Amino acid sequence: MNAVTSPEKGHRRDDSCSVPNVVMEAVCSERVAGMNTNVKGIGLVCPYCESHPAVVEDASSLVCPRCGRRYSEWNGKPCFLADDVGTVDSWREGYSKAVSAGSFKKALITLAQKLRAPKVKLRRLPHLDLLEALGKRGAFKALYIGHNQQFEDKLSRDIIQLNVVPLEYVDIVSMGEYVPFPDDSFDLVVMSQVIEHTQYPFKVVEECYRLLKPGGKLYVSTPWVYPFHGGDNYRFSNEGLRFLCYQFDDIKVGSLNGPFHALAVFLAYFVGEGLSFGNRYIRYLVGIVVSWLVFPLVVIDALTNRRRKKTYVLDANIYAIATKKGNEAPM
C-alpha cells in the first residue's frame, strides 16, 4: 500500500474549516444509498479533522459535520481517499489494469507462481502469534494496513483490512496517514511489508499510535537488505525501526529472513533482470528457473536464522513489535 500525501497539496487536520469540501466525490464516485457509519462495529470518523468527528449518513454518502467532506464508496467499500493526493490516479489506473487483465495473462501469472520454488516457512509470522493471543483472550479488534488476506471466520469478524484500492478482502479504502477510525479503537495494528511503500512513514506510525488502545501492540515488518521492488521508497535498519516507533514502549526487534535469504533474492533479481531483456514473458520463465537454483540458500537461511546471533547487518527482512504506553494489557 502506498499511503501518500503531497507536501504541497496534502491535507492538514484543521477543525477551523467551515466551508463544505467535496473533493472526495472525485475519487470515490459511487453513490450508494444507505451507507453504514461503522465497519465491523467501529464507528467511522473524518480522518482529516483534528478532533475526528463521527461522520453522519446523508442520502447516498457519509458527511463530516465539521468540515463538510463527503465520502462514498469504491466497489462497495467505504472510501476515504482525497483526490488531491498525487498518487491516487496511479492507484486507480493500476487497479483497473489488474481487474481488466486478459485471461491469458492471468493464467500465465498463476502458472508461473505455481511452478516457482515454494516459500520456506519453519515458523509462523509474529503477527499471527499476536492474533492467536488476542483470540484466546476473547473479544478484540485488529487493523491490518495495506493488507488483503482471507482469514478464518472466527478471526475475520474482528479484523479490519485497509488498503488504497478495494481488493477482495479489504473492508475500507483509505491511506495509512489518515485512517477514519476513532482514537483507542484497536488492540493490534499490523503493517506487514508495507511501511517501505509509504511516503510519510513516521506519520503512518503516529496514526497507528493514535488508533491503538493503551497497552495495544503495533507490528511492523519491512525489507532491509533487499532490491527495489516497485513503489518502494525507504529502508529501515533495526535502529531505524526503533526510531520509527519512538512514541511506543517496549520495542522489540527481530529478524524474519537472514543473510542467506538476502543473497538468494539478489541473485534471483540479478539473473532475472539481466537475462529477461525487458521482456515480461522471458522474465516469468527465468524467474521460475532461478527460484529453484537459489532454493538451497533459502532453505539454509530458514534453518540457521533463528540460531545465529542477530546483528541485523545483512538480514533480508526484519520486524518490530511495539507496545503503546498505558496500563491496560490486551495481550
Image: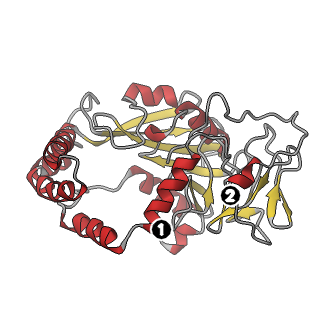
Q: Amino acid at mark 2?
A: Cys
Q: Give the mark toward the camera: 1 or 2.
A: 2
Locate residue 16: give its quadrant: top right
Q: How many marks?
A: 2
Residue 144 seen in this snapshot: no
Q: Is residue 308 left or right of residue 187?
A: left
Q: Amino acid at mark 1?
A: Phe
Please provide percent x and percent y for residue 72. 73, 60
Residue 279 seen in this snapshot: yes
Residue drawn at x 80%, y 72% as measured from the top left: 34
Q: Which residue is mark 2?
A: 28
Secondary structure beneath disc 2?
Answer: loop
Q: Which residue is mark 1?
A: 151
Locate residue 265: give its quadrant: top left
Please provide percent x and percent y for residue 179. 66, 47
Residue drawn at x 85%, y 36% as measured from the top left: 15
Locate residue 274: give its quadrant: top left
